[in-house]
Structure formats: structure tokens, C-alpha cells
Image (spheres, grey):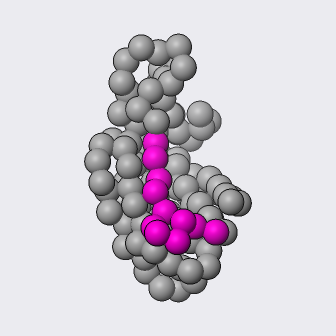
């Protein structure tokens, strides 16, 4: 399976990274997407998914339904051909455990 990620920061003052993912051969039964709830070396659940904005998917120009199945999992409806996903990540955590974006840098 080939995954291509593209990150952008159209307006850093909003503290949002724009993320797009292209999955060339998604699961024919419906692609499952996951975000970790922790990071190595940290013994607390961090719940990174709470910073993810609305997830939008399409197959060519056709919308694909995306359902959040629990705290940090999403499932896309079955489709044939490449699956394109887009979402925003709110990035205003200035610790070493999260994402941060402003006019000076992105992490």
C-alpha cells in the first residue's frame, strides 16, 4: 500500500496544519484510519485525535463517507481506486508532546 502525505499551513495564525493523504490501494472493505493515543516515553494517554478537525474523503471527485468509530479510529466507506483524505490538526501545544504552529515555526 502506498501512502502520500502532504502538509500545509495556509494561515499559521489559526494554528492549524492542513493534512492530505492519498492511499493508492485502500482496503476494499473500507479503509480504517488510526491515530495513536500515546507516544513512546510518555505514560499518559494523550488523545491526539481531539485536535483533528472534520475528516473529508473522496475517490476522484466522488465524496466518500467517513465515520468516526471511536475516540481515535475512522472508517471510510469502500471505494475503488485511490482514496484522498483531508483534515486539519489544531496545533497550539507548546510542550514536547504535541504539535505547535504559529507565524515563526511549525512542530
Q: Is residue 41 magenta?
A: no
Q: In which image quadrant can residue 72 be found?
A: top left
Residue range in magenta is: 25-35
Q: Where in the figure is residue 15, as x and y percent of width and height? A: 46, 44
Query: Is 57 displayed left or right of 104 in the figure?
Result: left
Q: Is residue 104 above or below residue 43?
A: below
**Who's the residue at 57% across and 61% down the image?**
20
Residue 57 visible at all: no
Residue in the foreground of this view, choosing between 48 and 33: 33
Q: Is residue 105 above or below residue 32?
A: above
Q: Where in the figure is residue 46, as x and y percent of width and height? A: 38, 27
Residue in the foreground of this view, choosing between 100 and 37: 37
Residue in the foreground of this view, choosing between 69 and 19: 69
Q: Where in the figure is residue 4, as x and y percent of width and height? A: 68, 59
**Who's the residue at 37% across and 18% down the image?**
44
**Who's the residue at 59% across and 60% down the image?**
21
Toward the front, the furthest residue is 29
Amino acid at each position: 500500500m502506498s501512502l502520500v502525505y502532504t502538509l500545509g499551513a495556509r494561515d499559521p495564525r489559526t494554528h492549524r496544519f492542513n493534512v492530505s493523504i492519498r492511499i493508492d490501494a485502500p482496503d476494499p472493505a473500507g479503509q480504517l484510519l488510526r491515530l495513536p493515543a500515546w507516544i513512546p516515553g510518555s505514560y499518559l494517554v494523550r488523545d491526539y485525535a481531539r485536535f483533528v478537525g472534520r475528516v473529508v474523503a473522496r475517490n476522484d471527485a466522488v465524496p466518500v463517507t467517513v465515520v468516526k468509530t471511536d475516540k481515535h479510529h475512522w472508517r471510510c466507506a469502500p471505494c475503488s481506486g485511490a482514496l484522498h483524505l483531508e483534515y486539519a490538526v489544531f496545533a497550539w501545544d507548546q510542550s514536547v508532546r504535541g504539535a505547535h504552529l504559529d507565524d515563526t515555526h511549525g512542530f
